[in-house]
Image (cartoon, rainbow, N blue to C red):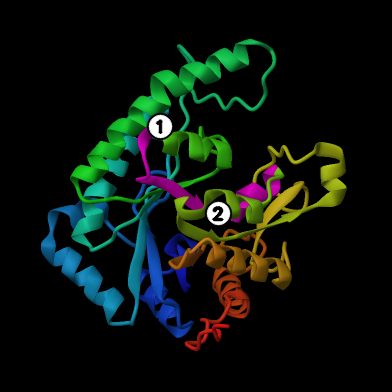
Amino acid sequence: MKIGLNTDSVGHLPLAETLDLAAELGLDCVEFPTGAWSTAPHVDLDRLLDSDAARRELLAQVADRGLAISALTCSGNPLHPGPTGREHDEVTRKTIALAPLLGVDRVVMMSGLPGGPGDANPNWITVSWPPETTRILDWQWSKVVVPYWRDLVGHARDRGVHRLCLEMHAHQAVYNVPTLLRLREEVGPVVGANLDPSHLMWMGADPLAAIEALGGAIHHVHAKDTRLEPGRQALTSRLETLPVMAATERSWNYVTLGHGHDDAFWRAFCLALRRANYDHVLSIEHEDVLMDPAEGVTKSVDLLRRAIPREPGSSKPQQV
């Protein structure tokens, strides 16, 4: 497995310094966010689509440092019932168009989340009572989620993109293994997981069980950790509405790798990926508000180097 960097992790740095940092750390690849919920600090989506020279320049900057591009990322909500949905859908389709022009075969995103009938904003249904909740959920999937994704999968296939990597994230139609597999069954294997264990952790799921259940449906992986805060959680549960900057008051926080789950967990995580035949990138996504980004990325790289299992030897077991 390779180690990469989602460049939003150091979004305060210019592109050249970001790539220099990745090279200095001995990383294999970078993942570029292109817009929607990201400010896309390192790439100009429209310029790259319009200019072959701009694409060659970006690819040269990456290759000159011994790096490759693992994925383009356009996480947003293309199913939002308001103008945001149209804007994010446009970014999504442009990103899908750009990926093959850069030689990239994976686009990381989220499923999006619609409202209910007549809603002005998305509505995340997480309970089955009162009775209207299940009616809203059924409407969301049958009238919005599945039709949109059938169309988007066809759009991606037509442009040579065969891996749309969905992050299982809160306030999305796809937020856990069953919803990911449900959408994949409806629209086909172009849809797979961008497995980010940090979200599963705070929602109470088991990332190792998720890997086993998803198997070959894992298209991409984000390396990000979550620390659960037991004292606060005892009073508030894991349902948390305080802003991420209020880290000392929240019931859980995104943290640097190893500051939420120890080396033993990450070794088990990497071994589970190996058993699932995943051999692509672990893309570090640093969102620890209490640690300097460059320091957090460096610590995360060190942990992953300890955790990733060594390649098996070439010798084969003797037959008896």
The image shows residue 16 at horizontal and vertical percentages of 34, 75
- Please name the amino acid that badge 1 sits on: Glu
Please identify the quadrant where the C terminus is shown: bottom right
Classify residue 35 as left or right of residue 45: right
The type of residue carrying mark 2 is: Asp
**Position of 262 relative to 88 (above/below):** below
Magenta stretch contains residue 162? no
What span is colored magenta in the figure?
A: 186-203
Instruction: Specify whether 205 is left or right of 26.
Output: right
Q: Residue at x 25, y 37 (%)?
A: 154
Give yes or no for residue 193 being in the magenta stretch. Answer: yes
Residue 182 pos. (x, y %): 49, 34
What is the x, y in percent for residue 275? 56, 65
Q: Tell me how many marks there are.
A: 2
Query: Is the residue marked by circle 2 packed among few (<14), some (14-19), or many (20+) residues within 10 Å?
Result: many
Q: Residue at x 19, y 64 (%)?
A: 55
Of helix, strand and loop, which one carries label 1? helix
Label 2: state its secondary structure.
loop
Please report contact status of discs 1 and 2: CB closer than 8 Å, yes or no.
Answer: no
Q: Nearer the viewer, residue 139 or 186?
A: 186
To which quarter of the image does residue 26 belong?
A: bottom left
Which dot marks residue 196?
2
Residue plotted at (56% across, 76% down): 301
Instruction: Name which residue lies at 54% across and 24% down.
Output: 123
Q: First in sequence: mark 1 or mark 2?
A: 1
The residue identified by callout 1 is 186
Q: Is residue 129 left or right of residue 141?
A: right
Horizontal side of residue 244 vs 102, given as left or right: right
Residue 250 in the image: above or below residue 118: below
Asked if residue 251 can be seen in this view, the reply is yes
